[in-house]
Image (tube, rainbow, N blue to C red):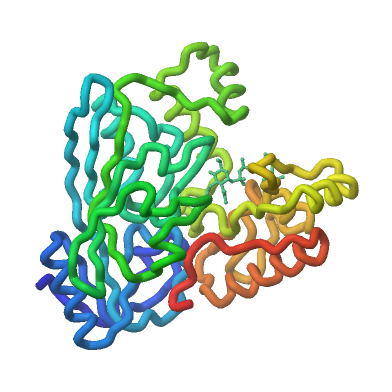
């Protein structure tokens, strides 16, 4: 069993930098240590929170039960035929350096997901996505510990039920499984995904006609740095709300009233840019005490230093209400609030 600590300050374990305290805390670096921690929590009837990078989390001041910090690392690669490779990463590996490692090895497919904060194990939870690629596209399978039975189970892509910022683990069985490793099917041949116009424009501006995945990686990093605050400097959890889906009728109605509305077709529906809706309601750059709305991206809420989850949730509620009142659209929070 790894060392059990009490009343632990979690401010450096969550990207908002909120000063939360864990009643009990343990870091696990192997499957056996994880299994021990789960048994301990079950014996004490403690609720469990597994922390990856804490980058999609809004932590309240007191965190009851057991916080398990995921520290299972490891990187393996196995060739599959001539063009493919199966890469398996421990859940505690940090996403961005793992992506750099993949690129250095010549394993391609996930480069559009550069600079996303957090760990490998957290990535499938919400099917991380950016610049035209979602995790599920390079995903092969994962292994997760069932906290109810103590048994390790492999999940195929279908079984993970990936959706937009969603998975089986996030919505169907929240809290039941702890992801321990993730396998990706990657290409040995560069296959850049250039579905996002901003990427095409930026590559063109740099005079790059046949972009290598490394070029794409650089461009994505630069665009993200220009729009999103670095959590080390300013506490945040990336997009605070999901981009809402609305029906075609609702879209047509809104478009008539607001010709500048930013929306993208998504199947039968339309996906709205929540950042645009929030900006229209006058929130961009607005601060309230120690929390606020980022001045360069209205979809990002920030902790200006000594903010708390309660302060942030009050601001978030007001934003939701104002967007609802003006556009008839309900914004859904993206990070997890804990305890809920
Ligand atoms: N916009 C505004 N004002 C703003 C922000 C955005 O008008 O303050 C409009 C602009 O027209 C802009 C459009 O919204 O062109 C889209 O903005 P952006 O490209 O910044 O992307 P997003 O829709 O706000 C989503 C993801 C991001 C991901 C980017 C790029 C969600 C919830 N967010 O943001 O993911 O990096 O697209 O693919 O889907 C995250 O999930 O934490 C995250 C950062």
Q: Is residue 89 left or right of residue 232?
A: left
Residue 179: x and y, percent?
28, 58
- How many numbered marks, from 0 up? 0
Q: Is residue 226 above or below residue 233?
A: above
Residue 252: x and y, percent?
83, 46
Quarter in which the N terminus is drawn: bottom left
Residue at 74% over, 43% down: 262
Residue at 29% over, 28% down: 107
Q: Is residue 56 left or right of residue 270?
A: left
Residue at 66% over, 54% down: 244
The one of 169 and 275 positioned closer to us in this rendering? 169
The one of 90 and 264 positioned closer to us in this rendering? 264
The one of 148 and 239 positioned closer to us in this rendering? 148
Residue 153: x and y, percent?
23, 59
Q: Is residue 203 above or below residue 186?
A: above
Q: Is residue 291 above or below residue 202?
A: below
Q: Is residue 134 above or below residue 204?
A: below
Residue at 47% over, 66% down: 336
Q: Residue furthest bottom?
A: 44
Residue 20: x and y, percent?
40, 75
Judged from the image, the quadrant occupied by ligand 1 is top right
Q: Quadrant of residue 218?
A: top left
Q: Is residue 207 left or right of residue 218?
A: right
């Amino acid at each position: 069993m790894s060392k059990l600590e009490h009343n632990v300050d979690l401010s450096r374990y969550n990207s908002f930098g909120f000063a939360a305290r864990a009643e009990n805390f343990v870091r696990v670096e192997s499957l056996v240590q994880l299994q021990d921690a789960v048994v301990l929590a079950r014996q004490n009837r403690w609720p469990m929170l597994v922390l990856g990078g804490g980058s999609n989390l809004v932590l309240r001041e007191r965190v009851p039960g057991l916080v398990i910090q995921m520290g299972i690392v490891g990187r393996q690669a196995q060739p599959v035929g001539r063009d493919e490779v199966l890469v398996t990463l421990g859940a505690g590996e940090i996403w961005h350096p793992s992506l750099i490692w993949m690129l250095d090895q010549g394993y391609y497919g996930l480069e559009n997901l550069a600079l996303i904060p957090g760990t490998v194990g957290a990535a499938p939870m919400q099917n991380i996505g950016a610049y035209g690629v979602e995790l599920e596209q390079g995903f092969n399978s994962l292994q997760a510990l069932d906290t109810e039975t103590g048994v390790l189970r492999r999940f195929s892509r279908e079984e993970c039920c990936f959706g937009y910022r969603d998975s089986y683990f996030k919505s169907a069985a929240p809290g039941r499984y702890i992801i321990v490793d993730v396998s990706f099917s990657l290409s040995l041949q560069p296959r850049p995904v250039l579905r996002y116009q901003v990427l095409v424009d930026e590559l063109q501006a740099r005079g790059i006609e046949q972009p290598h995945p490394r070029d794409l990686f650089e461009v994505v990093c630069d665009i993200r740095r220009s729009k999103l605050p670095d959590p080390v400097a300013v506490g945040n959890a990336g997009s605070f709300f999901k981009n809402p889906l609305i029906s075609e009728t609702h879209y047509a109605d809104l478009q008539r009233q607001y010709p500048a509305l930013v929306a993208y077709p998504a199947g039968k529906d339309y996906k709205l840019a929540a950042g645009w809706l929030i900006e229209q309601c006058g929130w961009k750059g607005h601060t309230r005490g120690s929390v606020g709305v980022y001045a360069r991206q209205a979809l990002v809420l920030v902790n200006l230093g000594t903010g708390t989850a309660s302060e942030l949730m009050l601001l978030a509620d007001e934003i939701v209400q104002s967007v609802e009142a003006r556009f008839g659209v309900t914004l859904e929070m993206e990070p997890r609030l804990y305890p809920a």
